Image (cartoon, rainbow, N blue to C red):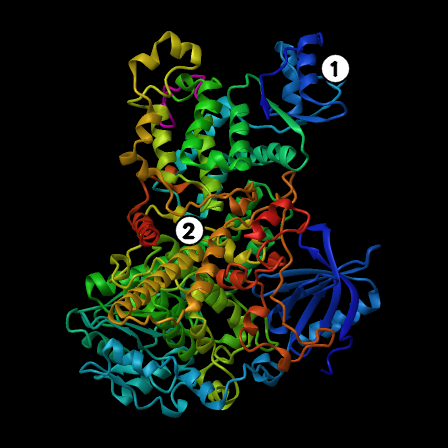
Amino acid sequence: MEHIRMPKVENVRLLDRLSSRRAVVGTLYLTATHVIFVENGSEIRKETWVLHSQISSIEKQATTATGCPLLIRCKNFQVIQLVIPQERDCHDVYISLIRLARPVKYEELYCFSFNPKLDKEEREQGWKLVDLNEEYNRMGVPNSYWQISDVTRDYGVCDSYPTEVYVPKSATAHIIVGSSKFRSRRRFPALSYYCKGNNASICRSSQPLSGFSARCLEDEQMLQAIRKANPGSDFIYVVDTRPKLNAMANRAAGKGYENEDNYSNIKFQFIGIENIHVMRNSLQKMLEVCELKSPSMSDFLWGLENSGWLKHIKAIMDAGIFIAKAVAEEGVSVLVHCSDGWDRTAQVCSVASLLLDPHYRTMKGFMVLIEKDWVSFGHKFNHRYGNLDGDPKEISPVIDQFIECVWQLMEQFPCAFEFNERFLIHIQHHIYSCQFGNFLCNSQKERRELKIKERTYSLWAHLWKNRADYLNPLYRSDHSQTQGTLHPQIAPCNFLYKFWSGMYNRFEKGLHPRQSVTDYLMAVKEETQQLEEELEVLQERLANLQKSQSGNNKVKSKQQDRSKQFGLYTSNNSSANTPQEYSNDLKSFPSRSPSQGDEDSALILTQDNLKSSDPDLSANSDQESGVEDLSCRSPSGGGCLPSEDSGKDSDEAVFLAG
Amino acid sequence: LLRSSQPLTGPNRRRCREDEKLLGTILDEGERGFIIDTRSAQAAKQARMSGGGTEPKSSYPQWRRLHRALDRGRPLQESFARLVEACSDPSLSMDRWLGRLDGSRWLSHVKAALSTACLAAQCLDREDSKVLVHGAEGTDTTLLVTALAQLILDPSCRTLEGFLGLLQREWIEAGHPFHVRCARSASSHARGKQEAPLFLLFLDCVWQLSRQFPLSLEFGEQLLLTLSDNAYASAYGTFLCNSEKERSLCKVKESTHSLWAWLEQPEEKHKYLNPLYSHNPLVIWPSVEPQSIQLWQGFFLRWIRPSQHLQEAWDEIQRLVEGN
């Protein structure tokens, strides 16, 4: 709290992002973990909560007659425009936020103070929900070809790998150690995915330190061991996910790529995915397009093309498709690497796994996939997503791109995933939020040293608890689309890549379809289930009545309430009552969260006051959630209705009366 | 909501008492109306040289004129052709796709059409004002705007029956010259000068509405595709000729079958219904931001993109809704 110069500022205006005409006035609070804006005067408290961890940049703009503007850009793509009346106050807020958004110690992060009111055992259970050992067993390892390596205990050989790493049985400790010395950051080839149907595997590593001509016997033996672990094929693919030019340039620095002449029985392949700096700039450019005021179609399309973002997404996808094909159709093992084997390698391995194995398209399976290929294999969450203040050149939207690849696939295969878009958006949100401990630090080693599992909570448990919100109503485990490998169309397919406005314009509800098919179908599904249960009960009662003369008069009233609830939902089908400015003004809405409840809201809210049910949703107004809509059936269902003239609109009155 | 063609003001600023009186009687004392001219102000002015023009303020004092330039004719046809080309170009790489998409300008036309229709709807619904829409001939962009505006405003136009009625009224009977507009489509090189995909643009706009309000239209994409097919080549007489007069002269009603009658048969109808539909009594205001307007893949990529997975999704939706 020592960084907060001004804990509270009154008469602050929160502007509609692009139209300064629509501003709301309220009070701004700064707490140890959040920035909170509370609107004045509305009967239902409308609040906007932003975690400091989410703040990407803060811009203090030139003072105008109305006050001093402050623009806060968040890592979850929320953009908040405030106007603070006094320049001095604005400056204090600015300085405080700068410091609060750039924590220096892990202990400053929200996850260490977040309290969902679970006991120690529940916390532990939460962490056990995703078990990598179980996952490897499910894949079919250890077996006669693969085993856990001995040498990775205590992080001796490679400190960014987990302690449990699977290697081919024929790779002795000597080979592993030797190979690790020949790989950047000692990240030797290790198992990412094993296909028990044909013994083909996906392995991952970093680049070899081959320079122009260096060789390493053990590393060559390591690749042979991988080949031998798949008796069905006499060669392996080695896929370098970098552009050829970059890989070649690395040779001058003593690194590089595998020479087919030195490594027997490999087929080498470049798949050019650009590096983290290119990706960072690409996202930056795309966000600039999103911030344009009233763009024309051309502004938007050219801006999007200029950013190159969709091209990069496609490159990652193409790499994943190539690897999935090699494994599923050719039965050939693949070794994947980039430079350090923790960015592009992670992206490509997880996309390929998703295509290959339907288990990863279930909710649990997806959590496991992220735990395996991202968390355990040492993706540098801290550096990439700025948990702590660090080198801005390390920041890059690597996992965001992977998450987008999943969304693109969901759009092409609507029945294939057990989870929905909201699941992906919430995961992305929490990668940056530091509300849970899963995505802290840069490696398993660091997390264990910090005792993350004893001191924080697991996101997976939280999402799992709320899994009803994240289900895809079209998913059926027996559906053809959910079986086996997914085969996205390869060419022509440019048009298949769409701009993900649900993510990058997440908080501008006006841009999205006004009616959620997902929520509607989930409600239909639940209602059907309800009715079926009711039918069963009634049939039972009928049977009982027929048996005895004295009727059983117990009335089950809860069924009635619930069907009323859904009746309400189905009339909740029009959330678009206000036109935007069709003479070229963009309509968007300030984000808001459900009220924090009945606690005294005049005070600065501390963790204790936060409801344990879903503090997560308080940090973002996720109005796509049909469940949330059902619960906010108040006129501020204004939480549900993005309308700036609520109350005046007679259309709305009709709608709400339902 | 009214529609007409342009007033024949001409270079000498002719007046017509009857026309002024007609427009005068539509408005009450002191009431203001809007004229939405679908030509740019400059184009409208230039039209005077060839005998056309606009309503001068002095002669029509209660009416306020708004110009919203919508492309028609040759430019629209070329836009369509370019888009179709871009979609089927196998050599097009990802880093040039969006540029080609934009270069066709088709989505810009969709945005402009929807914006103008929304403007008309807004005048009616929010300003409580009467609106007169016209372009030059009153047979192309005019109909685009009035038909879309009604879809936005009036829930009865969003039922299957209501929509077909809307088409019959606002496109066929209103005299959109289908015969010359929908002769050859995009790929033919022998394109007549009168060829222009206004009706297709309308269907695209309707699709955009259905994407933004998936629960509010009683019909689905399949209907729109069927209509687009029949406008160009049909076993039915509905889209024949250029006007009611021609249809009468050709005895269309006596010698052909109606597409509407066929579509409304119970055994056919179900193919065109939207399983997600539930009556929405309110006005549906679409977003016309670029992010909200998407390429109508079902139409433009109909033969290029595999639709199996999407069809499976629709089947699943049908199953879920029917199970309820």
Magenta part, dominant SS: loop
The answer to whether residue A516 is visible is yes
- Estimate the x, y position of residue A473 in percent, counting from the top left: 37, 59
Residue A601, above or below A299: below
In the image, which residues are magenta? B183-195
- Estimate the x, y position of residue A465 in percent, counting from the top left: 44, 75
Q: Under tag 1, what secondary structure?
A: loop
Q: Under tag 2, what secondary structure?
A: loop
* Tag 2 residue: A497
- Estimate the x, y position of residue A24 in percent, counting from the top left: 73, 57
- Amino acid at circle 1: Ser
Total labels drawn: 2
Q: Which mark is residue A162?
A: none
The stretch drawn in magenta includes residue A444: no
The stretch drawn in magenta includes residue B194: yes
The answer to whether residue B16 is visible is no
Residue A196, above or below B140: below
Q: Which mark is residue B59?
A: 1
- Estimate the x, y position of residue A246 in percent, counting from the top left: 44, 63
- Amino acid at circle 2: Tyr
